[in-house]
Amino acid sequence: MRLAYAREFGTPMPPDSPEEDPGDEGSPPSQWPLAQEGAAGEAADAYRSSEWYFPEQQPEYQPDPAYQAEGYQPEAYRADGYQAETYEAEPYQADPYHSEQWYMPEQPYAAGAAYASEGEPVYQPEPIPEPEAPAPATGARGGKGRATRKKTYTRRGVLAGAVGGGAAVAAARLLILEKPDVLAGFGGTVVNLSDHHGRLHNNVIDAPQPQTQVVTQVVKGGAGFPTISEPLLISQLLRRFTFGATDAQYQAANQQGFRKTVDSLLATAPAQPPPFKAGEALGTKINLNDLQDWWITHMITTPTPFQERMTLFMASIFTSDYQKVGLDNPFLIWQNRTWRDMALTDLRSILKRVSIDPAMLIYLDGNNSNGRGTPNQNYARELMELFSIGLVYKETDVTEGAKALSGWRVPKTGETSQVGIFDPNRHFTGAVSFLGRNQPMDLDGAIDAILAHPASAPFITTKFVTEFVTATPDQAYIDRLAANFRKSGFQIKTLVRDILLSPEFAAQANFRALVKSPVEFMVGAARTTGVDPMVATPVIRNYSRTLGHQPFDPPDVGGWPRNIAWLSPVSLMNRVNFVTDFVNAAKTLPAASSQAVTRYLDGILSPGTNQTLAQAQTDASRWWTLIASPDAQLA
């Protein structure tokens, strides 16, 4: 395994990674069958010819020294007595790529172990420390404060960091992967989209060269752009909305077709997790590992994975964390059940329930907010900025909105309610000026004003589209969906149905256009392989912490990162480490047949994955290849 790891990813396997028994057929083999020397060399040449390869560091841009001079102001423009306002140059900011912790201008490209000739020492890069997490912000904005959002990574930055860290092969295979112009036929065999040189067909890189023709199922959409075939569309639906499919779900969906599958998913009531083993009554003490295992296990085993994926999405928007809410009450369990029940209702009901959820009342300081004195403003701000309309409010809307939202508290021991309790003696009863309305206002009135705001429907629509369709949606697409969303009375089912049936969801340009979050990736691996949840859950829980996607602990009130923000050299290696531990822990795995490949990766593989998979000797090593592949990181 260590040799395979080194040859596949260009860096030695971490010394603390478990070494499997070479004779155990349930584990990846100790030595992987490798491609011939020439094939590896051609792959390296293709990598070097790509637009992401930087053989030597280009000099940094140096601005005119005059613009860096302290207090420099260009002479004001004068003409016919007219004097323009003086232009003040902005302070020069270095390219953020060069400020990355792993940026090393002196580090040339070096081939990994897979390309080292026999007898020569393998290049050993210096270890690259994981970037430090930003310190939580302090202040009155609730939760852990409005901490700086987790740093995002550009393609160039990630690749450069991976090259410096010795992970160039893995990072390049993921980041250079462009969606081909044609998608392979959807059958029961593995489809190789590469040409005889082992490269993906790519309009930018391969345009001057003739390309092998492939039989396709691509059709022209009514919107004027290519769309994927129905089998691929079903597969994409199950991958993005259900953590991936089991054999039974996959077969049922293909038998009934895409539209009927959409109708069936939307019509199914959510299955709640079993009762929490320590109880769910007020006064219950919660163990964090047990709490996380309870939810992770349900994500793996639930008969309604569509609803569970929506629950995870809700938790990423309406965030609360155990560190502030605490583990001396069952409020996070109650909240988790609430998001599952409310996920496919309507926005008005959701915002009302969010506002009086006990965990949220604690997390964003709405508990015991006194409108007769100085009401806390945290929740009023985040209700608008993060939960409903975005940054389109005024500061007076925050202060006045806090008065309208005052008077709520969490239930106490002996009370049976699982939502907040309203205390009229702590509520502001006068007129408030909130989002253009001036009148006495309570929680319902505040939500009415929010939903009447023109930004509400586009704001929520954008959250759904960027989560499930594309990270860069066209504004006309958002506006079209938002208009029908508002017309429906903000019904979430209507919005989700419109998204799924839209040509944009089926667009070839949006095929594998999203990056799976760590929990999506890991739960999907467990559901697809059918590994015992008692085995899979502890591994997923441990790596959810390593990968920064720990249930019940978002980084800040803004929730977890999305899409490309999940990628870094460190996180890519940790995903591979997860697969190693997951496969080793599983002991036995189902047959990795061509049907399994079709179900898990649509039968469409990048050349490196296809080659490695073809030479794997055991089911364990085949599953390792599939799950650890760059292809499997994309949704």
Image: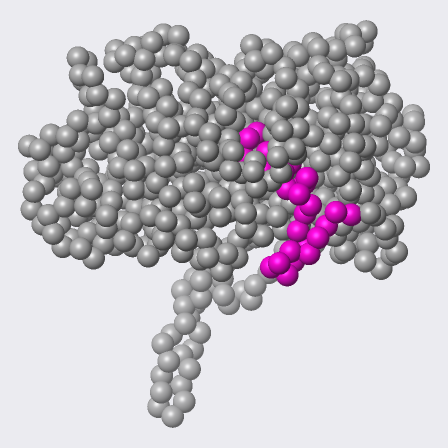
Give how far across and how far down residue 443 sits, in percent.
Answer: 19, 40
Res. 84 visible in picture: yes
Give how far across and how far down residue 12 sits, in percent.
Answer: 75, 24
Q: How is the image coloured?
A: one colour
User: Is residue 225 one of those drawn in magenta?
Assistant: yes
The reply, left or right, for residue 514 in relation to residue 231 is left
Residue name at image x 17 percent, y 55 percent? 437
Comparing 252 with 349, the one in front is 252
Give how far across and how far down residue 406 sits, in percent.
Answer: 16, 37
User: Is residue 597 one of those drawn in magenta?
Assistant: no
The reply, left or right, for residue 446 in relation to residue 74 is left
Comparing 223 with 620, the one in front is 223
Quadrant of the drawing holding the N terminus = top right
Give how far across and how far down residue 351 sits, in percent.
Answer: 30, 39
Residue name at image x 51 percent, y 67 percent? 66
Q: Quadrant of residue 377?
A: top left
Residue name at image x 43 percent, y 26 percent? 270
348, above or below 74, in the image = above
Res. 570 visible in picture: no
211, above or below 164, in the image = below
Residue name at image x 82 percent, y 54 percent? 206
Comparing 108 with 618, the one in front is 618
596, above or below 490, in the image = above
Quadrant of the drawing holding the C terminus = top right
Region in magenta: 216-243
Comparing 435 with 2, the one in front is 435
